[in-house]
Image (cartoon, rainbow, N blue to C red):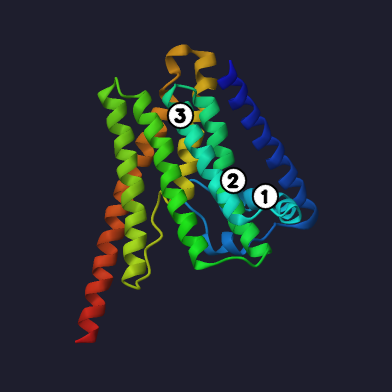
Amino acid sequence: MIDLGCSTVLLALVLVAAIAYGARVALRGRAASERVEREGNSLLVSKSAMELFHWVLEPIGAACERLGITANAVTWGSLVLAIGAGLALAAGHMGVGAALATVSAAGDALDGAIARRTRTASEAGEVLDAAIDRYGEFAFLAGLAFWFRASSTLLGLTLLAVLASFMVSYSTAKAEALQLEAPRGSMRRTERAVCTILGAGLSPLAAALNPAWFVGPIAVAVGVVGTIGNVSAVRRLVAIARAARLREERAQ
């Protein structure tokens, strides 16, 4: 019951936020964001959806600034919530896990907003944020892997998603280390988070219609992340290798 309640509340909040942002756009236009413009559209998350997300977080960031809550405090808090989400998923509480992961993901975006508002952004903070992102995503997928441990198929799909998470991030880091521009590709951090949280959140709703459908949404989610993510990672690495080879040839 608690999982169905969490999923229902999440769905209701998303609908209310979408309606409120729609009214905002109609009255005042889009809530433009430099970060959204930089990231652009993605396969699963439109620019409008990302603008909505950052628009909702803006007043929360302002409140944190007034209360003296630091960006690093929010970053560490998002990790605690991510671990909580992983533990909930490991126990089969998909709705609770989705709710905690959603708040954790919001914290992941909120810390950067606070750092910019308080002019405390730093390279050290970026390192901490990136590390917490990796640990938080692993906690979510590790929780799923534990819950799916009795099914080789579902466990395999989850491990494929873990590999996709690792390889997509690695391709970006490798391109930055070589000072090359990484192709945008698919299944970046935001897309993976949306896909897996959506899958977990829909599972209790599906189970309410038919108990046999409980694992369906989350199984599809990790399968999509694992398949598309690994294909994207390979394509990005091939493109990076090609760009590196071309630069070497031009230097000769």
Q: Could you tell me if residue 134 is visible in this image? A: yes
| Residue at the outermost bottom position | 252
Using the image, tell me which numbered label, if any, was put on residue 87. 3
Task: Tell me if residue 235 comes above or below residue 96 in the rendering.
Answer: below
> Mark 1 = which residue?
57
CA separation, marks 3 and 1? 26 Å
Q: Quadrant of residue 137?
A: top left
| Residue at the outermost top position | 211
Number of the front mark, 3 or 2: 3
- Pick the residue in front: 13 or 186: 13
Q: Secondary structure at mark 2?
A: helix
**Residue 106 % position (x, y):** 59, 45
Q: Quadrant of the N terminus?
A: top right
Using the image, tell me which numbered label, if any, was put on residue 106. 2
**Residue 102 % position (x, y):** 56, 38
**Residue at image point 55% right, 50% down:** 75
Horizontal arrangement in the rendering, residue 188 relative to residue 122 (left or right): left
